[in-house]
Amino acid sequence: METVNEILKFSFSLVALQKEARNLFAENKNFKLLHEARISKLNKITEEAGESNFKKPFPKLIPQVFEKFKSIMQTDGLFLGKFEKSELRTLTYSLSYSEHNQPQIFSQPNELDVVFEALETVWKDSYLIGLMDCYLKNWETKHASSSEKLGNFIFKKLRNYDGNRPILKSLKTNMKFFDARNGDVLLGSELAIKNKQIKEAAKYLLLHESWFLYPYFSKVILAYYVKRKNDVQVFIDDLSHALHQHNNSISNKRVVSKLVIQANSMQVDVLQDKVKSIAVKLVGDPAHASNWTAFENATEAEKTDLESARKILNEWIIKQFISVFFDVCISDVRRKSYWLSKINDISGFKIYGSAVYQSRLKQDERISDLVANRYQVTRGTTALMLSIKDYVLIEFASEGSAFYAFKSANESAPNFEGEYYEGLDQFKSNSDPMLVTRNGRALHNLRDEGRLIHRDAELKWEEVFDSWLNKKVLNNV
């Protein structure tokens, strides 16, 4: 008797079904890959089209056009019509150029007027890219009148623009961000509110990523940080990367100084270590005051921030070095604790000792990058030299060694600045007078220079040291 399948001539094969299913999934997978490839290609075409907007003239053309313009200016602009149309776009990129002691075109308001006149004769919207390039490069310039004149010309053209080029439409839409009064601050704040990465600031405006190096983005970054500072531990790595990419010393000082001050108030060791590393890399070692000098046109508030940040950073570094020195070189908890309590008074330090101890200190990642500038390989006893006000103080690492104090003005005192010593043992002697004469709990004959022993009696040695330091060095008594 025939089965139903045979009557209906229906043949079912599980193996065949499985094979067809595999083919179907393979086709879907291939379709997905093809779809992704087409999207990637489209994105690349779009990106390349955008790149063409920012393609600058051949470098050799800029000096030629600059010289031609300067020559025409000597004729009171009589031969302005001699500019070829192809040269006018190059002229927009020549505004910030200078050579042979000739000032920038941008710095001369009357010359800018001549440039605008030349551009107007055969105006092309593409000129706006070169003009904007100059405008953002010269943000916060000392040539304020030139910047205002250029900005007004750009804004007039943008307001009249009704084309479809994405970059120009973006510039028109985002004109508020280019207002010299606070446009940069507005952009930084908006990026923070929208939780965008600050390194994407140029891209946010459809500008070429290379423009992120321009001075315009200095206060964009600062405003972004200020707006998001309560979440600094979340975005500090992105901020550090952005500052490195921006590569501007003024921006580094502006932002890093505030970072240091904030991290100090938060009292979070991990954050302080990270900020310390960022600060040393982007601004410099605070031991060298020149690294932290105020930049040109810095406000009084910015100057104060830089001074405060340098002092704080120096204290962090001193604290870490003292901790590691007494842990590694002598293992004396009491001496370590004592000098850590004086961190706010110590303005500088240097370590002298063997290459072995130098190597050990470098193994501590908190100070490894700073050891080279603060350690001098010598013979003899390892020692820590401290600077407090008008004094140079030396703590020798060997057990039972005395502490020695010298007035900085003393010609025979050790010198921090550039002096090489084969060892500091030459500065210690058992014949040196005691800084204090002890009689029970009474202290007499406090001397300006000499030595003290780390030895307890009716008074602990820390109490004796404090009495001498407060009266002779810190003038607190």
Image: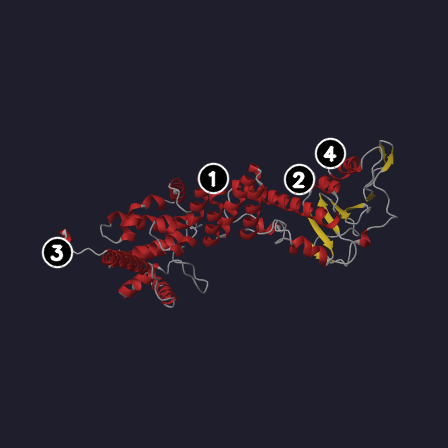
**Mark with earlier residue (2, 4):** 2
| Mark 2 or 1, closer to the camera | 1
Q: Can residue 240 be seen in this view?
A: yes
Q: Alpha carbon of mark 3 to alpha carbon of mark 4: how far?
A: 110 Å
**Mark with earlier residue (3, 2):** 3
- Give the amino acid at mark 3: Lys
Mark 1, Cα crowd under 10 Å, few <14 / some 14-19 / many 20+, is few
Q: In this view, does 251 lie to the left or right of 132?
A: right
Q: Is the residue under label 4 in contact with that under label 2 (CB below 8 Å)?
A: no
| Mark 2 or 4, closer to the camera | 2
- Which quadrant: the C terminus? top right
Q: Is mark 4 on a helix, strand or loop?
A: loop
- Give the amino acid at mark 2: Asn
| Mark 3 or 4, closer to the camera | 3
Which residue in the protein does label 1 denote?
A: 231
Q: Alpha carbon of mark 1 to alpha carbon of mark 3: how far?
A: 72 Å
Q: What element carries label 1?
A: helix
Q: Nearer the viewer, residue 70 or 75?
A: 70
Q: Is the residue under label 3 in contact with that under label 1 (CB below 8 Å)?
A: no
Q: In this view, does 85 lie to the left or right of 420?
A: left
| Mark 1 or 3, closer to the camera | 3
Which residue in the protein does label 2 denote?
A: 344
